[in-house]
Image: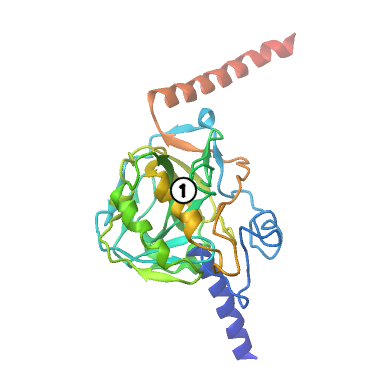
């Protein structure tokens, strides 16, 4: 009996652990078998059991309505530690749901930017549509999407990589989201040309390859002003959809050539080339914002908007007694 109890606890912990290091491969023996490409397990059914808390109230991704964004003076510049380290990116793999790149333990971290503590970087993965001509980003801005989106997943440093603890903390994880925009310059940037050269080695689910090129996160995030971003509290965008993520979505997109973006949807498969379709449309649909507020850096315009709203509210309060007497 004791052994059975320990085994159940271990399996439960494993299910949580794998979902945090998302996207991951889910085998028949695992608790949750979710997908993007089949009606029985795609995001239209994630809101039902046994897919965790995907029907929660602070789910991701969202559509960012810029007219409703509020300024926040605490959203200062980030400190990106190790982002220039060109040996920190270790292994690229086909998880069966995306392409994921693992970051060496303890080599990269992020702090500042309104975060309450330091976070260690675990991995990054990508979401895309069907070639560069269609939307594939998870977040949108005023309804506008992009062909791809890159997510860097980070965990509170105090947890020492313990994702089981992290998903129980409303801010246990910090995700950095970057839009990817298609450009007409073939084979550029060079960093993305190097990264996508590995896709031919990971065509099937479970395939992996060690990165031989010296590529840093800074190289991949070329052209992005990382002082300009949106902030909101959300969730993982795949099951079990734990609401434990501080989301940062950067305003500037990474510009990657169409031919390199197209390699993702024309090279890798959900399972194998012989028994599954190509990996396309790997993103979750937009979720309700509910009562949440999206914030950004405080500027003259956002401050003015906030002040105008406050002034209008005070005016209404002042006029209410007069209207009531009438």
Quickly name the residue at label 1.
149
| Res. 26 image quadrant | bottom right
Name which residue lies at 38% across and 57% down.
196
In the image, residue 89 lies at what x, y percent?
32, 63
Of the pair 186 and 174, the residue shown nearer to us: 186
What residue is shown at x 44% (from left), y 69% (from top)?
A: 162
Relative height, residue 154 to residue 62 (above, below): below
In this image, 219 relative to 324: left or right? left
Compared to residue 27, the image places residue 296 above or below, namely above
* Residue plotted at (47% across, 37% down): 295
Left or right: 80 in relation to 235: left
Q: Give the image location of residue 148, x and y in percent.
A: 47, 47
Report the quarter where the N terminus lies.
bottom right
Q: Secondary structure at mark 1?
A: strand
Q: Quadrant of residue 27?
A: bottom right
> To which quarter of the image does residue 71 belong?
top left
For the residue pair 101 and 304, the one nearer the viewer reads as 101
Image x and y of residue 7, in percent: 59, 84
Q: Is residue 9 visible?
A: yes
Q: How many marks?
A: 1
Give the position of the C terminus as an image quadrant.
top right
């Amino acid at each position: 009996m004791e052994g059975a109890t320990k085994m159940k606890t271990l399996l439960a912990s494993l299910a949580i652990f794998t979902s945090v290091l998302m996207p991951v491969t889910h085998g028949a023996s695992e608790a949750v078998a979710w997908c993007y490409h089949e009606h029985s397990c795609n995001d239209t059914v994630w809101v039902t059991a046994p897919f965790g808390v995907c029907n929660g109230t602070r789910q991701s991704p969202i559509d960012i309505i810029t007219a409703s964004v509020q300024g926040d003076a605490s959203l200062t510049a980030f400190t990106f530690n190790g982002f220039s380290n060109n040996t920190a990116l270790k292994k690229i793999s086909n998880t069966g749901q995306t392409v994921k790149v693992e970051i060496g333990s303890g080599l990269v971290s992020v702090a500042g930017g309104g975060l309450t503590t330091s976070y260690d970087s675990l991995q990054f993965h990508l979401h895309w549509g069907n070639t560069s001509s269609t939307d594939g980003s998870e977040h949108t801005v005023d309804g506008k999407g992009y062909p791809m989106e890159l997510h860097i997943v980070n965990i509170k440093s105090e947890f020492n990589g313990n994702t089981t603890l992290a998903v129980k903390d409303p801010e246990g994880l910090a995700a950095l989201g970057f839009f990817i925009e298609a450009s007409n310059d073939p084979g550029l940037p060079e960093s993305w040309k190097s990264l996508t050269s590995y896709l031919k080695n990971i065509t099937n689910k479970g395939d992996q390859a060690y990165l031989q090129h010296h590529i840093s996160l800074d190289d991949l995030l070329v052209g992005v002003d990382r002082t300009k971003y949106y902030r909101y509290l959300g969730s993982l965008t795949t099951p079990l959809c734990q609401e434990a993520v501080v989301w940062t979505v950067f305003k500037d997109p990474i510009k990657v050539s169409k031919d390199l973006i197209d390699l993702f949807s024309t090279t890798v498969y959900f399972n194998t080339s012989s028994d599954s379709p190509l990996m396309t449309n790997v993103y979750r649909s937009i979720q309700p914002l509910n009562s949440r507020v999206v914030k950004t850096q405080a500027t003259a315009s956002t401050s003015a908007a906030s002040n105008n709203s406050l002034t209008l509210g005070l005016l209404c309060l002042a006029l209410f007694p007069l209207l009531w007497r009438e």
